[in-house]
Image: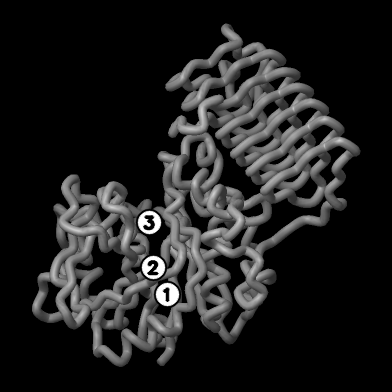
């Protein structure tokens, strides 16, 4: 059976705050070394699926640059599959993608080329390792028209997801998208298998429906579940899976990597997460520098007296003497000044933090994450409280007050041509 994979990577990701102000959600860095998109791409090639389409829309530049011709994933193939990236275009019959279903509908002439038997649809913003081959086999043996991967989530988190009801045979009996009062905690993972002709029929009918939002979770799947023409089954998944679409879940997925027995294993050599990386020198930890329970990437420098605990440092981060970083995610080429304290925060690329800056919460139970957008310069002595946010390209003169309180969002006052 010939399967073609489609990765939906056009998400704007507004819930990730400054991390997605200048990049698509799947292009957001993860675990110091990767981009979020690397997990879906690597799952495909590790499952021996080498015929991939990637559909992008919002700020796709860094995503396209990262993937390139697909070499790191062995996807730089011309005639036997490979990865192809599609973006929207304006014409009398086409426009910006309205929803996930519309994104595939507008590209369906490419999707059906070569007549694949099944279409595997994936989200480009989830962190997990999954072999898709057993799901494909389940789909074929059950005679399903549509198969949805499903996972049990904590009931308090269920309103974030599409929630499934299933019969004893595993057939889906109900599908409710993001219910306020979820009837169960069996969640849709955003991983779908469709027979090609079934997908074609459903997309076309949805395209003709003027009141549709043209989304799989809101429109396509609830309709298919209640349509007697189609058999829709749930495929149970029991491994680690995280939708990193919120600041808290993005932070939590990093913390999950740092325990003594991590819920998600990046070091499994039988299931390598492939990515594109640049060459950096080795990590340098000065005499008296302390690193505990952390992931530290190439090119980092930890000076004497600096302490890094339960954190993830991307390539090129410099932690000056006396600085403390705890339970934080620090992206590429950040410079942390002497005596600075970072706790439960996310700092984007190329940020410069002055001496004795305080960022984030001093309370381990504080649920809100402080964030600093890339290229920003934080003046010495500034205090960025838990849940506060600094935008991209902020400079010292943008601070009218050195204390940014919880819930505040500081943006640069400069014009775009001044940045």
- Percent of width and height locating residue 193: 34, 77
Disc 2 target residue? 107
Check if mark 1's residue and mark 2's residue have beta carbons within 8 Å.
yes
- Percent of width and height locating residue 237: 38, 72
- Percent of width and height locating residue 162: 26, 58
Q: Secondary structure at mark 1?
A: helix
Image quarter where the C terminus lies is top right
Tell me where residue 225 sits by quadrant. bottom left
Taking 336 as reference, is 327 left or right?
left
Who comes first in sequence, dot 3 or dot 1? 3
Disc 3 target residue? 91
What crowding class fits label 2: few (fewer than 14 Cα within 10 Å), some (14-19), or many (20 or more)?
Answer: some
Disc 1 target residue? 110
**110 relative to 320, above or below:** below
Q: Secondary structure at mark 3?
A: loop
Q: Nearer the viewer, mark 3 or mark 1?
A: 1
- Percent of width and height locating residue 218: 22, 56
Between 264 and 171, the one lying in front of the other is: 264
Between 164 and 156, the one lying in front of the other is: 156
Q: How is the image coloured?
A: one colour
Tell me where residue 328 sits by quadrant. top right
Q: Residue at x 71, y 15 (%)?
A: 380
Q: Residue at x 66, y 66 (%)?
A: 267
Separation of disc 3 and disc 1 at Cα?
Answer: 17 Å
Q: Secondary structure at mark 2?
A: loop
Tell me where residue 73 sits by quadrant. bottom right
Taking 315 as reference, is 178 left or right?
left
Q: Residue at x 77, y 56 (%)?
A: 278
Q: Which disc is residue 87 wearing?
A: none
What crowding class fits label 1: few (fewer than 14 Cα within 10 Å), some (14-19), or many (20 or more)?
Answer: some
Between 307 and 27, the one lying in front of the other is: 307
């Amino acid at each position: 059976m010939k399967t073609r994979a489609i990765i939906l990577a056009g998400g704007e990701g507004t819930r990730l705050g400054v991390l997605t102000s200048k990049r698509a959600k799947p292009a957001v860095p993860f675990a110091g070394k990767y981009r979020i998109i690397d997990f879906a791409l690597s799952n495909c090639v590790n499952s021996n699926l080498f015929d991939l389409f990637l559909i992008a829309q919002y700020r796709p530049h860094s995503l396209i640059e990262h993937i390139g011709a697909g070499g790191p994933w062995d996807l730089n193939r011309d005639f036997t599959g490979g990865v192809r990236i599609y973006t929207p275009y304006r014409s009398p019959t086409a426009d910006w993608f309205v929803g996930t279903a519309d994104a595939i509908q507008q590209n369906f002439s490419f999707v059906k080329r070569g007549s694949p038997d099944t279409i595997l649809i994936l989200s480009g913003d989830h962190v997990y390792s999954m072999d898709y081959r057993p799901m494909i086999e389940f789909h074929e043996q059950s005679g399903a028209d549509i198969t949805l991967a499903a996972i049990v989530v904590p009931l308090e988190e269920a309103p974030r997801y599409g929630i499934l009801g299933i019969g004893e045979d595993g057939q889906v009996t109900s599908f409710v998208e993001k219910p306020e009062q979820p009837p169960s905690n069996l969640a849709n993972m955003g991983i779908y298998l469709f027979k090609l002709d079934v997908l074609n029929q459903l997309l076309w009918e949805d395209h003709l429906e003027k009141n549709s939002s043209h989304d799989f979770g809101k429109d396509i799947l609830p309709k298919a579940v209640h349509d007697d023409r189609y058999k829709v089954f749930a495929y149970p998944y029991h491994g680690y899976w995280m939708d990193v679409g919120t600041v808290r879940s993005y932070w939590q997925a990093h913390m999950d990597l740092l325990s003594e027995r991590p819920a998600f294993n990046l070091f499994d050599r039988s299931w390598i997460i492939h990515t594109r990386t640049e060459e950096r020198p080795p990590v340098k930890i000065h005499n008296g520098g302390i690193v505990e329970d952390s992931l530290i990437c190439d090119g980092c420098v930890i000076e004497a007296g600096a302490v890094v605990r339960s954190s993830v440092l991307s390539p090129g981060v410099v932690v000056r003497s006396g600085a403390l970083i705890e339970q934080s995610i620090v992206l590429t080429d950040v410079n942390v000044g002497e005596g600075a304290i970072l706790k439960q925060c996310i700092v984007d690329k190329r940020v410069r933090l002055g001496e004795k800056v305080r960022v984030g919460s001093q309370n381990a139970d504080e649920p809100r994450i402080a964030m600093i957008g890339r290229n920003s310069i934080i003046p010495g002595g500034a205090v960025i409280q838990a849940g506060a946010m600094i935008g991209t390209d902020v400079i010292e003169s943008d601070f009218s007050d050195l204390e940014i309180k919880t819930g505040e969002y500081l943006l640069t006052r400069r014009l775009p041509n001044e940045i």
